[in-house]
Image (cartoon, grey):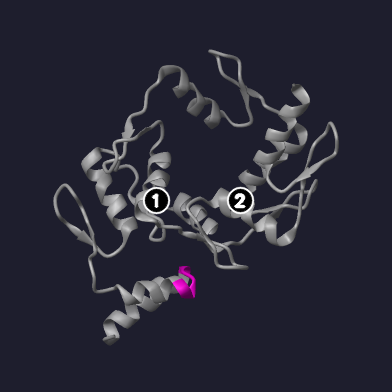
Amino acid sequence: LDPIRASRVSRQDLFFPATTTLARLATMGEKSHTCPYCGKGFRRNSHLTRHLATHSGLQQEDRPFSCSYCGKTFARSAHLARHQETHSGERPYKCTYCGKAFGRNSHLTRHHSTHTGERPYECGVCGKAFTRSAHVTRHQGTHTGERPFRCTRCGKCFTRSAHLQRHQGIHSGDKPFSCRDCGKGFTRYAHLERHRATHSGEKPFKCASCGKGFGAASHLVRHQKTHKV
C-alpha cells in the first residue's frame, strides 16, 4: 500500500472491526459492485445500495449524512453519530427490571414497555395499540396498501425505505452486524441482539401469566398468545 492510501485506511478504520478492515483492504482497488442502470462501479455493496436510491428516488437531499458502514442515510449528523453506536456494540443504558443493556436511552425506554405492557398509541382505523407512535404510522400502511419503496433487483415493494435497505441485504449477502463472541454475522441488529442471548443464557422477558422466561421479546409475545387461546 502507498503511504497516502494507508493513511486513508487507518482513519476510516477507527470505526470498524479488524476482520472487516482486512476484507476491505483485500478489495480496495476493485469495483465489483455495478449499478444495473448506469453501469457505475463501486468497491462496496453499501455504496451501490446508496447509489441505487438515486435511480429509484429514495435518496433525498435532506438526508446528506450516510453511515460508511451500512449506507443508511440521515438528515442530521447527530442522528448519524447516534446510529453508529449500533455498530460499536456499546450499551451503556441498562434496564432496571431485567438488566438488559441498550446503546440508546430511547431504546431502553421503549424496552420498558415489554415489562409494563403499556401501549398508548392506537390505530384510528382498527384500534390496534402500539408502544411507539412511529409504529402506528407504519401500521397504518397496512390499511392503505401503499408500498412505495421498490427493490430494483426483484421488484418487491415495501412500506418503508429502511425495510427496502434491509431486504437488499438478501441479494448482496451483506451482514454488517457481527457477534463479538463468535463472529457470526447478521443482516439486522435485532437478530444480533436475539443471538447474543444464546451465549449468555439470559431469559429476561418473563410471561406475567405463567412466569416462563424468554431470550427475546418477540418470543414472549408469541408465547403470550397461547394464554389467549
> Earlier along the polypeptide chain: callout 1 or callout 2?
2
Q: Position of residue 226 (x, y in %)?
A: 74, 28
Q: Is residue 75 visible?
A: no
Q: Residue at x 75, y 22 (%)?
A: 228
The answer to whether 219 is drawn above or below residue 77 in the figure is above
- The residue nearer to you, when weighing 122 against 30, is 30
Q: Amino acid at mark 2?
A: Arg
- The residue nearer to you, when weighing 44 against 103, is 44
| Discs 1, 2 touching: Cβ within 8 Å | no
Q: Which residue is mark 1?
A: 169
Q: Main secondary structure of the magenta part?
A: helix
Q: Residue at x 58, y 63 (%)?
A: 179
Q: Position of residue 186 (x, y in %)?
A: 51, 56
- The residue nearer to you, when weighing 113 against 210, is 210
Which image quadrant is residue 183 in?
bottom right
Q: Is residue 166 visible?
A: yes
Q: Which residues are magenta?
A: 15-19
Q: Which residue is mark 2?
A: 104
Q: Residue at x 62, y 44 (%)?
A: 106
